[in-house]
Image (cartoon, rainbow, N blue to C red):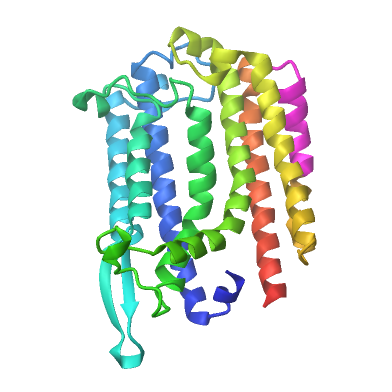
Amino acid sequence: QTALLENTASRTILLPLSLQFALFACLIQISTNLHNDYADFVKGADTAARVGQARATQKGWLTPAETIRGCCLALGAACVVGVWYLIPVVSAGGDGEKRCCARGWDPVMAFVVVSSLFNAVAYTGGPFPLGYVGLGNVSIGYSGLGDLFVFVYFGLVATLGVPYLFLTKVAFVSTPSFCWNNKAAGFGEFGLNGLLWKRLLTLLYPSFLHALPIGFLAMAIIVVNNLRDRHTDIHARKKTMAVRFGRRFCQVEYFLLVVGTYVFCIWFWWSSALNNGKWTELLPLLSLPVAIPQLKAVAFGGKDGSDLNVHVGGTAKVQLFYCILMAIGLRISINISI
């Protein structure tokens, strides 16, 4: 990937791809939060006894109808961005002036877009819109799968999205021998033979490794959130991991996720150092001073209920600083390599 970034034309398209995927991700985040705000209220999870941060519907700042309209607007905008920018691909063939292009669609990114749109409303479930198609009882969060969902979509998908788009829309397409218009590959107008898929996965492997700690910290945020809300969630029949397994389980889970993030950082640097890795891989360790107070309070402290609100945001800050430092390290590493 570093070698690909040496190409000026490739670098110029990286920023638009990043902004497009970031816009899609933000719109999915907004729509998920708005639907969660609406559905938790109508399903009885958000009552006057709520100990978490203020919710617009629960506080009466917005009616359920207004909240769900906002959700639909954000979902519609996310759908437009996904269908218009993320799913289409252009395959190239020929050389020089004889070079030709054919438009197709990317089934991997199509799955990401469609599943993200569905999960935005399926995370909490509720009567709208899933109730209209007989899926009103479907709920990722209420069934205890919220932790896994957050790891996959807020960790892996969110981190791998831009590298995947860069490779499939720029790196492979710009090389005549890599042609997406390969019906023999089984994707209609879009396809990669086995050799190209193997190369794609090989190039994405470093990004996958960097996505793991980001997913761990995203899970840690939801762990604190569910630990805080477990008493009210019981009455709403919201069977989160905290409700199913209790406080001690969540404390151990939180400890493993946060500590595991930094252990992974050291392991990744050590394994990279064996192959002339860079010291910049250790930069995320500078976020440890932000993480230690959260660990003490959540994993070892006796805080509960609303007292954990500050640590939901605190854990989010840990993830933010970790990601910023990781990005800086990667940027420095690329400059050194180039």
Left or right, residue 159 beside residue 260: left
For the point 63% across and 38% down, which residue is it? 217
- Is residue 71 at all visible to an observer of this figure? yes
Please tell me which residue is depicted at 43% across the width and 11% down the height of the picture: 236
In the displayed structure, 12 sits above or below 119; it is below
Is 49 colored magenta in this rendering?
A: no
Q: Position of residue 84 (x, y in %)?
A: 28, 59
Quadrant assignment for the N terminus: bottom right
44, 330: nearer the viewer: 330
Q: Dividing the picture into quarters, in which one does residue 246 lie?
A: top right
Which of the 4 image quadrants contains residue 290?
A: top right
Q: Residue furthest left?
A: 132
Up-down: is 143 above or below 76?
above
In this rendering, does residue 307 appear at all?
Answer: no
Q: Position of residue 102 (x, y in %)?
A: 26, 73
Lateral position of residue 162 relative to residue 110, left or right = right
Q: Is residue 119 left or right of residue 189?
A: right
Q: Is residue 302 magenta?
A: yes
Residue 61 versus residue 156 in the image, above or below: above
Extreme-bottom residue of the structure: 97
Q: Nearer the viewer, residue 19 or 105?
A: 105
Secondary structure that dominates the magenta span: helix
- Percent x, y for residue 155? 54, 44
Question: Which region shows up in magenta?
Answer: 288-303
Q: Which residue extends farthest top?
A: 235
* Picture coordinates of residue 315, whole percent (x, y): 65, 35
Q: Quadrant of residue 218?
A: top right
